[in-house]
Amino acid sequence: MTEIDTQVIEFELNEKRYCVDLNYVAEIVDKGDLTQIPNTPNHIEGVMDLRGETTTIINPKIVFDLENNGDGKRIIVFEGANQDSDDNIGWIVDEVHQVRQITNEEVDDPIKTENVKGVIKEDGDFVIWVEPPETQNQ
């Protein structure tokens, strides 16, 4: 099997590390003021204007059924994450750590779900590789 290198960006939710394929990431910004939209699912925190583009901001802690604590001070923006449109989606994360190169050999997939691509061991801990959002109404 051919070894494939992938660049991922590591981020933190509730003091646990996660990562996502860097190819899906448009940018990382500080969390600004969000405009809440009435009658939206509870994982949608609101929208914000990023350089003239309306970006829907999602709380991945709710999507992944995690406790909703932590700072939530950074936003990872996924450009055109909704396959049916060019809408931008952002995830509120507690912290963004690093970009790193991984290989298939580094990824275990003991628990594969629709949101989890695999698990990477790093410094005696685990980094959970998650899939980016495909639709606004996950």
Image (cartoon, rainbow, N blue to C red):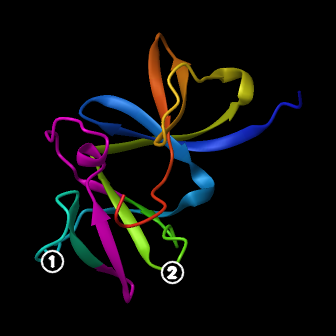
Q: Secondary structure at mark 2?
A: loop
| Quadrant holding the C terminus | bottom left
From the viewer's side, name the closer residue of 17 and 60: 60
Which residue is disc 1 drawn over? 37
Residue farthest along the top direction in this orientation: 124
Residue at 39% across, 31% down: 17
Residue at 57% across, 59% down: 24
Label drawn at residue 85 = 2
Q: In the rendering, at what x and y percent does residue 14 appear?
A: 23, 33
Q: Secondary structure at mark 1?
A: loop
Which residues make up the magenta segment?
49-75
Q: Could you tell me how far apart the alpha carbons at marks 2 and 1 are, in whole angstroms?
A: 19 Å
Residue farthest along the right direction in this orientation: 1
Q: Is residue 71 left or right of residue 111?
A: left
Q: In the rendering, at what x and y percent does residue 63 appear?
A: 30, 48
Query: Disc 2 marks which amino acid?
Result: Ser
Place residue 101 in its image quadrant.
top right
